[in-house]
Image (spheres, rainbow, N blue to C red):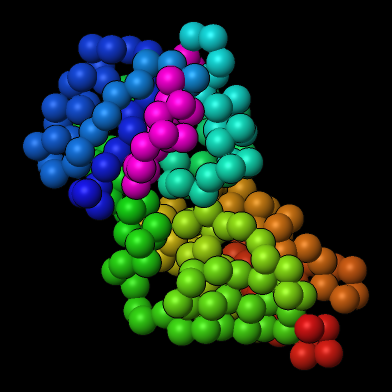
C-alpha cells in the first residue's frame, strides 16, 4: 500500500475532483468522500495515512466529525477552512487537527502541507530520535509513544514532534518561529495562532507538575520553555 494514501472529504464535488487530480499527479493516492459520515465510515473500514477534512459540509460538520474521530484515531488531519474564518481554524486545532489550510487553497500548498504532515506522522526528515525523559515525562523513540507518571497519553503527530523539540531543549526557551519551522515545516505567519493552540493541547494532555503548575512555561514575546522536572516527580 502507498504511504501517501489520503482521504479527501469535501462536499464540493468539482473542487474535490480537481484536487484529487492534482494530488494524484503529485504521487498521492486519493479517495474522495463528500459527507462527514461517509468520511468517518471510510476511515473505520480502510487504511489511510492522512485525512483532508473540510469544515463546512452538509449535515454533520467537519468539526463534529473531527471531535468524534479523535476519540478513536490519531490519524493526521489537515483541515480545509473558509478564508478569514479564524474561529474554525482555532477550534479545529483545539479538537486535534494537525494543521489547516484556507479555502480557496493553492493545490501546491495543499500538497506541501500534506507532505509535511506525513513526514511528521512517519518520523521522517528529522534528526535521529532517541528516548527522552524529563521527570515524569517519558518519550520512547521506537514506539513513538509518551507516558506521564507511567500513564500513556495519546498525541497527534504534531503534538509528538512539539514535545520532542521541547524535551530536547528542556530548560531553554524555544521561539514560536523555531517551533513553526521545526514542527509545522513552515514560517510563522503574523496572525498565526497554531503554535499556541498545539502547546495548549500538549499542556492539557501532560497535566500539571508536582507543584501544581504546568511544566510548559510561556515566555512573553519569546516562546515556550519546558522546565527541568525533578526526578522525584516521576
Q: Is residue 199 visible?
A: no
Q: How many marks?
A: 0
Q: Outermost residue toward the top?
A: 58
Residue placed most toward the observer, 214 or 83: 214
Residue 121 appears at what percent x and percent y? 39, 57
User: Which image quarter: residue 218?
Assistant: bottom right
Q: Classify residue 92 as left or right of residue 204.
A: left
Residue placed most toward the observer, 68 or 169: 68
Check if residue 43 falls in the magenta segment.
yes
User: Quick one: quadrant of the C terminus?
Assistant: bottom right
Q: Which residue does the image show at 37% across and 37% down from the upper left?
A: 46
Residue 108 appears at what percent x and percent y? 20, 38
User: Which image quarter: residue 23?
Assistant: top left
Q: Outermost residue toward the front?
A: 45
Q: Outermost residue toward the bottom?
A: 231
Residue 160 appears at what percent x and percent y? 52, 63
Residue placed most toward the observer, 61 or 147: 147
Q: Classify residue 95 as left or right of residue 141.
A: right
Check if residue 82 falls in the magenta segment.
no
User: Which image quarter: residue 213?
Assistant: bottom right
Q: Is residue 77 visible?
A: yes
Magenta stretch bounds = 38-57
Amino acid at each position: 500500500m502507498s504511504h501517501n494514501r489520503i482521504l479527501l472529504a469535501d462536499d464540493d464535488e468539482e473542487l474535490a475532483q480537481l484536487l484529487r487530480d492534482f494530488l494524484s499527479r503529485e504521487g498521492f493516492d486519493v479517495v474522495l468522500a463528500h459527507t462527514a459520515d461517509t468520511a468517518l465510515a471510510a476511515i473505520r473500514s480502510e487504511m489511510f495515512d492522512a485525512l483532508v477534512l473540510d469544515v463546512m459540509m452538509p449535515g454533520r460538520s467537519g468539526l463534529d466529525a473531527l471531535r468524534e474521530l479523535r476519540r478513536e484515531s490519531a490519524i493526521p488531519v489537515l483541515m480545509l477552512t473558509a478564508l478569514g474564518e479564524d474561529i474554525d481554524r482555532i477550534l479545529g486545532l483545539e479538537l486535534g487537527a494537525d494543521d489547516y489550510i484556507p479555502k480557496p487553497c493553492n493545490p501546491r500548498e495543499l500538497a506541501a502541507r500534506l507532505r509535511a504532515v506525513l513526514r511528521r506522522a512517519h518520523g521522517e526528515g528529522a534528526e535521529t530520535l532517541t528516548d527522552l525523559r524529563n521527570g515524569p515525562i517519558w518519550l520512547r523513540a521506537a514506539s513513538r509513544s509518551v507516558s506521564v507518571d507511567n500513564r500513556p497519553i495519546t498525541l497527534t503527530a504534531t503534538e509528538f514532534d512539539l514535545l520532542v523539540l521541547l524535551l530536547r531543549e528542556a530548560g531553554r526557551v524555544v521561539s514560536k518561529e523555531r517551533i513553526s519551522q521545526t514542527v509545522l515545516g513552515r514560517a510563522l505567519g503574523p496572525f498565526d495562532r497554531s503554535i499556541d493552540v498545539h502547546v495548549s493541547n500538549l499542556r492539557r494532555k501532560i497535566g500539571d507538575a508536582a507543584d501544581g503548575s504546568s511544566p510548559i512555561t510561556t515566555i512573553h514575546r519569546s516562546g515556550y520553555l519546558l522546565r527541568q522536572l525533578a526526578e522525584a516527580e516521576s
